[in-house]
Image: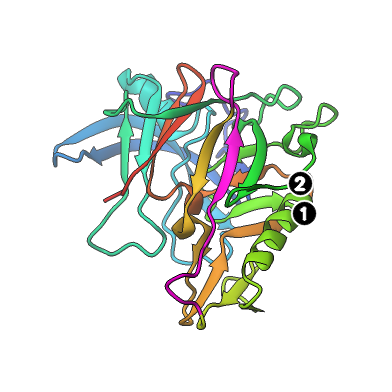
Amino acid sequence: GFPNSDSSCVGTGPCDYIYEYGDGTTTSGIVAYETFTFTALDGSSFVVEPITFGCGQNESLNGFPGIDGLVGLAQGSFSLPSQLSSALGFTDIFSYCLIPFEGTAANYSTFYFGVPETNILTYTPIYRNLVNPLATFYYVEVTGISVGDVLLNIPADFFSISATDGSGGIIFDSGTTLNLLIDVGYDAVLQSHKNSFQNFKSINNSYGGSTVCFDVSSATASTIYPNIVFHLQSVSGGEPVDFVLYPENVFLPPPETDVLCLTIMSINSPGPMIIGNTAQADHEMVFDRVNNQIGWASTTCT
């Protein structure tokens, strides 16, 4: 078997792996294990021996060349939180605070293991995909989406996991940059923004895919850039709680000036749909795997 994991490899040769992420990108190669040294925020270091990881040989990380590797944070036994929790006895809780996409070099995102320092958080339950129990994503129950103060007309079952084949659903995923919605939800969000930006011309984008950009050269100080709000099931089962995407979460500035691009992209069914890391930027995000809940608080990540 592999260290800090309940998995094993059959045979005597190298153990191959292939893994697909929520946005459809893949990695494949050989499974290995090695001693890792981590540097803490106070400058101290600690060693974990050994950690199981993948030596990637074939990646499909479209549009992001030069990446040295990916840190897996899902609920599987190979993810970094799972292995550190097993090896070092950390409470099975981790949190992070991501700087915005256009953050400065002087700032950096932070990652914590164990109980978070703040308790001023809003929580939503983590759900398992009962039809596909091997899915290690962080599924949440979305009850609706609003743009500004307007609740969009999206069918109630749009966000549900299919009881037939386990497809669909919506997840929080730090490894996916943009936010992905199946056409019905994407079309509703896009149309709402087009209604808000009737005086702004839609233009081709610089990021590829199906994001839509607007020429905002004629914007004024009074121009309103609406928030997008995901309404989520509360842990108490009462009134839904809100995860708010502020304008800096909703739009990305491409290389061109006076242009803003939506961070929402459309994907084909079966999903899952994704609340990605642009949405989570400047939010303290807490993944409490002890109590099966995700918490957040709006902040400035530095």
- Above or below residue 279? Residue 209 is below
The type of residue carrying mark 2 is Asn
Tell me what residue is drawn at x 79 percent, y 34 percent.
157
In which quadrant of the rendered view does residue 204 lie? Answer: bottom right
Name the one closer to the observer, 136 or 14: 136
| Mark 1 → mark 2, Cα distance in angstroms | 13 Å
Q: Secondary structure at mark 1?
A: helix
* Residue 168 on the magenta segment: no
Tell me what residue is drawn at x 48 percent, y 82 percent.
256
* Residue 227 on the magenta segment: yes
Q: Magenta stretch: give its range.
A: 219-239
Q: Secondary structure at mark 2?
A: loop
User: Residue 24: x percent and y percent?
Assistant: 66, 51
Q: Mark 2 sits on what residue? A: 153
Residue 17 lies left or right of residue 35; in this view the side is right
Q: Mark 1 sits on what residue? A: 183
Residue 43 lies left or right of residue 7; in this view the side is left
Q: Main secondary structure of the magenta part?
A: loop
Residue 223 lies left or right of residue 40; in this view the side is right
Name the one closer to the observer, 143 or 195: 195
Tell me what residue is drawn at x 48 percent, y 27 percent.
123
The type of residue carrying mark 1 is Asp
- Above or below residue 175? Residue 243 is above
User: Residue 233: x percent and y percent?
Assistant: 60, 27
